[in-house]
Image: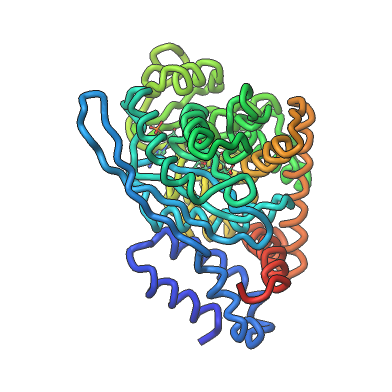
């Protein structure tokens, strides 16, 4: 059995009931065959892949909190500190009832390669809880965040591990967590990113993931002789990533015609009204039915279905495994030219393969959604120098980072004879830097 196959088998055996983690590992290690197979004995002797797929540290803790009626609840908190070869652990905190150790591990593993691709000095980590912020009062969310941070604060720090937002964790949650960290540690430091502008946040961090996604897509389309102007873009999700992806697509002259949440989706052939979407989702925290009620051109559908709308570009921006093989077939049949992941691992392995084999340009999230964490790293830099940069300065750095990521993954794919395979390109380019740092630092 090849070394890669041995390690994939070990990961499945040692991490039972963690299908998302298996999926993420399989995707990466399959790409790395091109590098590993040539030098199998050296990598095997160093147990390089075993070290790569095993988190440096995994924290699981109890999070008790009291609701508005006096009832006590107990959630589980997680922080997986996956790999610190190239910098302090960095990655978001997901608050969603579906969170479990396997999901946090898949996200942490992806984050290692993503953070490497940004070119910035950040290692990979991820955390979160099965707490559901939906329907909770601000006081309940604060009670949860304070309890969560009371434990987490023992393990993080501006030079150790710097968490940020993800699904269910936005500016409100980061604010409560920052306040509690400062109170417990008596340190005013850049321990979290995605902070409010009044207390150390960076301009353009809110927009960064969605904007970065479009900067990368624009560069890729340009390199394939296509412009963004006039393109129809189908987007899933209606959260932080989706909203600013749609906004930047419209600014580039394309038309974003869909969005979705966990209960339904919107088709708005006139183009999504981003200000209205922001009002419904960021301010009122309401369902998409409210968007449809306020906009004549929009149609609301229950369930899932955005991938059935004909488009040039599809951007999955909600959650993992939301673009399935039948969706991929439908996109291809409708003439879709490009799929770029705003979410982490939204496309299943078989759907990815089908899109690639059908000639659709496909960019994996670890490359295309890296603008968020890259801008978090820029927030860390600003915190360290105790300065704030202008929106234009941060945004122009973000553009350069995304353009560089595209060319790096494109070149890595070409170097290994896989021209146009950005999955292979991203995994190899991300891996090379991490491995060279791991090798230099010895067996630790
Ligand atoms: P938000 O919480 O702001 O929004 C998530 C959106 O996806 C919501 O519209 C939500 O619907 C929908 N959604 C979440 N879970 C499900 C589900 N199980 N089924 C259907 N719809 C769902 O999160 P973000 O926009 O920040 O994150 C979206 C994705 O992007 C995630 O995969 C995240 O890991 C990834 N990402 C985020 C980055 C960031 O900077 N925020 C950076 C890089 C990647 P509802 O409103 O009903 O909950
Ligand atoms: O998946 C991701 O890259 C994020 N949720 C952002 C992480 C960060 O540290 O900004």
Image point 46% across, 58% down: which residue?
105
Q: How is the image coloured?
A: rainbow
Q: Residue furthest front?
A: 186
Q: Toward the viewer: 142 or 105?
A: 142
User: On the rendering, which quadrant does ligand 2 occupy?
Assistant: top right
Where residue 206 sits: x, y (%)? 60, 30
Q: What residue lies at 57% left-to-right and 74% top-to-bottom?
A: 49
- Quadrant where the C terminus sits is bottom right
* Viewer can see residue 337: no
Q: Position of residue 262 (x, y in %)?
A: 37, 35
Q: Does residue 58 sit above or below 2 in this rendering?
A: above
Q: Position of residue 243 (x, y in %)?
A: 55, 28
Q: Nearer the viewer, residue 355 or 167?
A: 167
Q: Which residue lies at the image location 54% right of the left edge and 53% below the top edge? A: 125
Q: Quadrant of residue 32?
A: bottom right
Q: Is residue 182 above or below residue 433?
A: above
- Foreground of the two, 361 or 23: 23
Q: What is the tally of numbered marks visible in this picture?
A: 0
Compared to 215, does 421 lie above or below? below
Task: Report x, y in % for residue 177.
Answer: 48, 34
Q: Please, is residue 360 above or below residue 95 in the view? A: below
Q: Can residue 74 be seen in the rendering of this structure?
A: yes
Residue 281 falls in which quadrant of the image?
A: top left
């Amino acid at each position: 059995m090849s070394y890669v196959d041995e390690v994939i088998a070990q990961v499945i055996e040692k991490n039972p009931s963690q299908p998302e983690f298996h999926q993420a590992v399989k995707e990466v290690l399959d790409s790395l065959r091109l590098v590993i197979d040539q030098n199998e004995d050296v990598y095997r002797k160093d147990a390089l892949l075993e070290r790569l797929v095993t988190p440096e540290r995994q924290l699981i803790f109890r999070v008790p909190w009291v609701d508005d009626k006096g009832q006590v609840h107990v959630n589980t908190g997680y922080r997986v500190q996956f790999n610190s070869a190239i910098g302090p652990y960095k990655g978001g905190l997901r608050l969603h009832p579906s969170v479990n150790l396997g999901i946090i591990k898949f996200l942490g593993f992806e984050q290692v390669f993503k953070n490497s691709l940004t070119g910035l000095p950040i290692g990979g980590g991820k955390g979160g809880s099965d707490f559901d912020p939906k329907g909770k009062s601000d006081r309940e969310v604060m009670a949860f965040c304070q309890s969560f941070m009371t434990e987490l604060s023992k393990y993080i720090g501006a030079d150790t591990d710097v968490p940020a937002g993800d699904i269910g964790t936005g500016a409100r949650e980061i604010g409560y967590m920052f306040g509690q960290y400062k109170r417990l540690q008596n340190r005013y430091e850049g321990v979290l990113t995605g902070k409010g502008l009044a207390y150390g946040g960076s301009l353009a961090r809110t927009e960064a993931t969605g904007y970065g996604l479009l900067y990368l897509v624009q560069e890729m389309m340009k390199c394939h002789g296509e412009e963004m102007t006039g393109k129809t873009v189908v987007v899933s999700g209606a959260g932080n990533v989706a909203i600013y992806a749609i906004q930047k697509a419209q600014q580039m002259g394309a038309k974003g015609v869909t969005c979705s949440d966990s209960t339904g989706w919107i088709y708005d052939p006139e183009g999504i009204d981003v200000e209205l979407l922001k009002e419904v989702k960021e301010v009122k925290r309401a369902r998409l039915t409210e968007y449809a009620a306020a906009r004549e051109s929009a149609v609301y559908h229950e369930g899932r279905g955005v991938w059935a709308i004909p488009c040039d570009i599809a951007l999955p921006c909600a959650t993992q495994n939301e673009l399935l093989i039948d969706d991929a077939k439908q996109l291809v049949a409708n003439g879709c030219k490009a799929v770029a992941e705003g979410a982490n691992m939204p496309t299943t392995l078989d759907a990815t393969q089908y899109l690639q084999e059908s000639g659709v340009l496909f960019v994996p999230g670890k490359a295309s959604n890296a603008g968020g964490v890259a801008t978090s790293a820029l927030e860390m830099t600003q915190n360290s120098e105790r300065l704030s940069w202008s929106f234009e300065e941060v945004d122009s750095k973000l553009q350069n980072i995304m353009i560089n990521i595209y060319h790096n993954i494109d070149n890595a794919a070409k170097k290994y004879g896989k021209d146009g395979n950005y999955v292979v390109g991203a995994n190899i380019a991300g891996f090379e830097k991490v491995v060279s740092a791991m090798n230099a630092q010895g067996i630790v």
